[in-house]
Amino acid sequence: MITTISSLKAQQLDSVKIKFYEHQLYDVMEIIDTIILVSKLKQVVSNYEQNPTEINKVKLGIIYHETALNLTFLKKSKYKGYALKSYELLTQLENNETTTTALLPYIASYRASALSLTGGETMKLKLVDDAFKLFEQAVKKYGNISYLPEFLRGSVAENLPWFFFSKIKFAKIDMQSIIDKQNKNNEYANWKIMSFTYWAWANQHQSKKDRGQALNYLIKAIALDPDYKAGRAKAEALKVKFAK
């Protein structure tokens, strides 16, 4: 029944509403500054405790994910288990038939990524397999209208160890797909996502035959990120590497 409800909701998606919710969630997505992240985590937890609305619950699930991604794997981290907390919270939302349809692309994508992080933290490799099944569902349902399923799947794939070779391929597939869709519709993804995506493409295509296109994408990644909040630092480092 849950799958049927989710499938029906996927057919009712509205791109304008999805973009509206992107603006609502933007402040908790793709945070690379750990000082800002810790401060934002406290703020989001406090906001949810005082006002447990649906949007605040989604924000909580996403900030738990960002915390797990950036802080869990540090030595002596006190944030162990945040990936599982994110997954469980987002699972509740996705399985709730009253959840706002336009929030589902965010919920489903971060849920899959949180499960992969849980697998990495606990060394339960089956969870990574399960996560990619969730990613596949999310891409099929929401990939044409939201960059997030492919962006998160590609981001996970590019950091997997070699023995996940059947999944690593998605790093190239998904980033290329996002660029192709952005070329057709320049409002498909925001500047931050595209900065990360252009850097990721260049990082995955370092051979001499791809060097020209890779440099072009690095220049774009840098130009989109004047304040170093996305892919600029990594893009500049890779550009220096190419120059050598």
Image (spheres, helix red, strand yellow):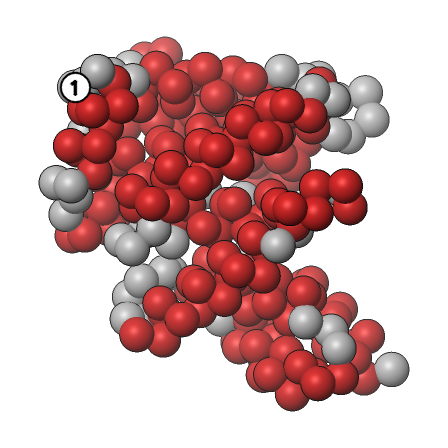
Q: At 34% from the left edge and 51% from the top edge, which residue is drawn?
A: 143
**Up-down: is 205 above or below 46?**
below
Horizontal relation, residue 55 to residue 126: left or right = left
Q: Quadrant of the N terminus?
A: top left
Q: Name the residue type under label 1.
A: Thr
SS at circle 1: loop
Q: Which of the pair 39/31 is nearer the observer?
A: 31
Q: Compared with residue 14, is residue 173 higher up or lower down, i.e. above or below?
A: below
Residue ranking furthest to the front: 166
Q: Quadrant of residue 91?
A: top left
**213 displayed left or right of 6:** right
| Total count of labels | 1
Q: Residue at x 49, y 71 (%)?
A: 224
Is 66 or 35 nearer to us in this picture? 66
In the drawing, does residue 220 fall left or right of residue 90?
Answer: right
Q: Residue at x 17, y 33 (%)?
A: 9
Q: Is residue 172 left or right of residue 143?
A: right
Residue 243: x %, y % from top left:
81, 84
Mark 1 surroundings: few (<14), some (14-19) or many (≥20) residues within 10 A:
few
Q: Position of residue 227 (x, y in %)?
A: 55, 63
* Looking at the image, residue 233 lies above or below residue 210: above
Q: Which residue is mark 1?
A: 98
Residue 74 x/y as whole percent: 77, 30
Question: Residue at coordinates 36% horizontally, 69% vertically from top-left?
Answer: 182
Depth check, front residue: 203 or 235: 203
Q: Residue furthest top?
A: 49
Q: Is residue 195 visible?
A: no
Quadrant for the C terminus, please: bottom right
Q: Is residue 10 visible?
A: yes
Residue 27: % across, % down: 41, 42
